[in-house]
Amino acid sequence: DIQMTQSPSFLSASVGDRVTINCKASQNINRYLNWYQQKLGEAPKLLIYNANSLQTGIPSRFSGSGSGTDFTLTISSLQPEDVATYFCLQHNSWPYTFGAGTKLELK
Amino acid sequence: QVRLKESGPRLVQPSQTLSVTCTVSGFSVTSYHVSWVRQPPGKGLEWVGAIWKGGSTDYNSALKSRLSISRDTSKNQVFLKMNSLQTDDTGTYYCAKHLPNSGFDYWGQGVMVTVSS
């Protein structure tokens, strides 16, 4: 199975900060990586699919980059409503596997 | 509007069978694949299995011997059954709709299942 190493596990940032979260795959997954946001008690929400495609309705402050084994989710200017846990998903090969998650809080 | 909602028992005894239902709206389970994903408390997400739009299934090899995924197309529902439950099967169980060639796009809120006597 492909292992996804996500970092950091925890992140504290201020409103307006640029925030980056990383996922590293144990082998090449091309661009088959998604990013999700999950708020407490809510369903996960798709932010970015296939490494850099912004899902419809998601604010443009969210962006994704990377290919191969290294991927980044960037929030260009952190907003209070962005407080959540973020996780990545590789869908290059079965079984699909996930990063362990990054909990983002406001400083 | 696409929605998925899981329903099922909150408490199951060890060695018993878990049955969870995913009721979907806004799309047909005959047009899109649906997966089950679970998350033990404090741990990461794990893909459990999937039912393809054509009706065939695939399972996580670690769970395959205990799993069954099926559907009722007339009710637009997908079912997860897992037998011989152990305490480490405790967790939140989610169903998720596949975005063609792009992982999952919509998820349910999940149902928290505790395996305990």
Image (tube, helix red, strand yellow):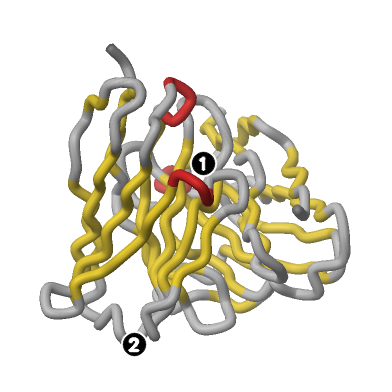
* Secondary element type, mark 1: strand
Which quadrant would residue B2 be assigned to in this image? bottom left
Horizontal side, residue B109 vs residue B26: left or right = right
Q: On residue B18, which mark appears?
A: none
Q: How many numbered circles does the render carry?
A: 2
Check disc 1: other Cα within 10 Å, few if <14, some if 14-19, many if 20+: many
How far apart marks 2 and 1 lie (CA) works out to 30 Å
Q: Say which residue appears at 56% left-offset and 37% top-offset.
A: A104
Q: Is residue B63 visible?
A: yes
What residue does disc 2 label? Answer: B31
Tell me which residue sits at (48%, 58%) in the image: B49
The kind of residue tagged 2 is: Ser
Image quadrant assignment for residue B86: top left
Q: Amino acid at mark 1?
A: Thr
Q: Which residue is mark 1?
A: A85
> Could you tell me which residue is drawn at 81 percent across and 74 percent down?
A30
Residue B40: x and y in percent read: 48, 31
Q: Quadrant of residue A5?
A: top right
Q: Give the image location of residue A79, x and y in percent.
A: 48, 49
Secondary structure found at label 2: loop
Residues flagged by tags 2 and 1 on a common chain = no
- Residue A76 visible within the image: no
- Residue A12 placement (x, y as % from top left): 62, 31
Residue B63 versus residue B41 in the image, above or below: below
Q: Nearer the viewer, mark 2 or mark 1?
A: 2
Q: Which residue is found at the position 43% from the left and 76% from the top?
A: B56
Position of residue A85 in the picture relative to residue A22 (left or right): left
